[in-house]
Amino acid sequence: MDTEPVDDYCHEIEAYLCRKNDGHLVRVVGPSFDLVSAWAAQGIPLKVAYRGIDRYFERYYRKGPRRRPVRIDFCEADVLDVFDEWRRALGMSSESQTPNPESRHASLPAHLERVVMRLSSARAGGALGGGCDEVIDRIARELDAARSAAGGVRGDARHALLARLADLDAELLRATRESLDETARGAIVRDAEAELAGFRAGMAPDVYARTLDTAVDRLTRERLRLPVVRFT
């Protein structure tokens, strides 16, 4: 990455940090510039870095009233953690299975209950295309029926249920993507392409196509606040 893009990247991070600090300017210079330049060199997308900064600030706010502006150096661990999570979600690391943040510390019945609630919320919110209503209602009914038995499901029956959840998750995303109008779909694809721009040169065409498709699914889920139906 040449000098100008690195400078632009650091400027964008500095501006975002300023907004998070309620307008207080904390310059990204010296060692801080070197730190953020390393993020750029690694290909960390700006939006991924922003989510890492957000994560630090969320934890900072929970500690009580703020006393001093946050320096970008404090956010490094969170930015790298979010970047690692983003890579795993796109299949860009040695881990082939995407962790499900909703199920990591939850029982299967509790997971199903949350998914049903979030599906109902997404449907009521009106952000989804009308063609999704039937799919969401059917999935919600199936999950609601599975919830009562999920706690006692073991062995092959549990494996079959987990496989079914993965199928339903894929069906939900497919129906949602098809319901989006051309403008919304195009905006998500462009954002996904921008996220992957720093990695495209090192990917074979078929790998890039699969990774882009995964990125589009992830952004679609985030934009429309869809739950992760699968359970891992």
Image (spheres, rainbow, N blue to C red):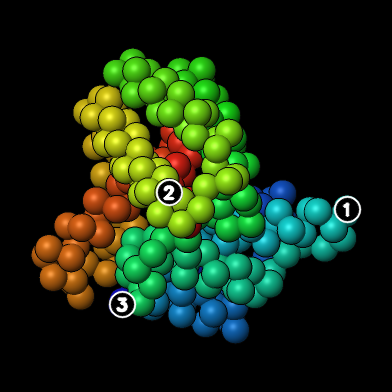
Residue 63: image x %, image y %?
85, 58
Q: CA distance from mark 1 to mark 2?
A: 50 Å
Label 1: which secondary element = loop
Q: Earlier in the sequence, mark 3 or mark 2?
A: 3
**What's the amino acid at mark 2?**
Ala
Image-based side of 31 in relation to 203, left or right: right
- Residue assigned mark 3: 2
Q: Residue at x 24, y 55 (%)?
A: 212
**What's the amino acid at mark 3?**
Asp
Q: CA distance from mark 3 to mark 2?
A: 55 Å
- Residue assigned mark 2: 157
**What's the amino acid at mark 1?**
Pro
Label 3: which secondary element = loop
Residue 169: image x %, image y %?
37, 41
Image-based side of 42 in relation to 206, left or right: right
- Residue assigned mark 1: 65
Count neighbours of disc 1 (C-alpha within 10 A) and say few if under 14, some if 14 to 19, many if 20 or more: few
Is residue 230 or residue 163 the one in the foreground? Answer: 163
